[in-house]
Amino acid sequence: MKIKLSETQICAARLIGEARQLSAEKRSSKSAFPEQWAGQFLDNHKNAACAELAVSVALQVKTELGVDVFSVPDIDGTRIDVRWARNRDLCKVTPRDIGKNRIIVGTTGTDAEIEILGWIEARDAPYRCKGSAKEPWCWFVDEFAWEPIETLTGSLMRPRDGEKIV
């Protein structure tokens, strides 16, 4: 599924991406993967914010894009974390995602057009995805492991009764 955001949506998401990069620099955050060219992290933050907005549009779920969102789901009121990657086989699931009972929605593309690859329960990644060969430990979701985004319904997205969103 491909989602085209409006110019207004793209501008808003890009501003959030810039704010995320500034916040990361201020906190001296270290990425698990090194920057491959100058400005890559900023570009990644902008595209990731656009991807989060595209997923909320596709799922018809309102969300507020936040700046320091490392410890909360990307889509408000759900268990969803959105992963954006330049390469469709590089969306990753981490052990932290499993521990937090997340659903991962994979995306690729640019701010002008985001492709939603599908979704996977994080806890299924060790069985359905390719593990990293070295640290940082994670699983990469290939195109055959994704569930169709159309099958991600409200009851799956939301925390279960009594489950706390962390």
Image: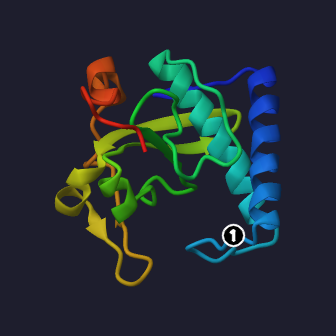
Q: Is residue 115 left or right of residue 141?
A: right
Residue bearing mark 1: 29
Q: Is residue 111 positioned above or below 134 on the image?
A: above
Q: Is residue 115 positioned above or below 92 on the image?
A: above
Name the image quarter holding the C terminus: top left
**Which quadrant holds residue 62?**
top right
For this rendering, which residue is in front, 11 or 70? 70
Mark 1 surroundings: few (<14), some (14-19) or many (≥20) residues within 10 A: few
Q: Is residue 68 positioned above or below 42 on the image?
A: above
Residue 94 makes an appearance in the image:
no
Q: Residue at x 32, y 30 (%)?
A: 159
Mark 1: amino acid = Ser
Q: Is residue 90 positioned above or below 111 on the image?
A: below
For this rendering, which residue is in front, 48 or 66? 66
Residue 66 appears at what percent x and percent y?
67, 38
Residue 53 appears at what percent x and percent y?
61, 30
Q: Residue furthest bottom?
A: 134
For this rendering, which residue is in front, 141 or 31? 31
**Which quadrant holds residue 163?**
top left
Residue 141 appears at what percent x and percent y?
34, 56
Q: How is the image coloured?
A: rainbow
Q: Residue at x 35, y 50 (%)?
A: 100
Residue 32 appears at what percent x and percent y?
55, 73
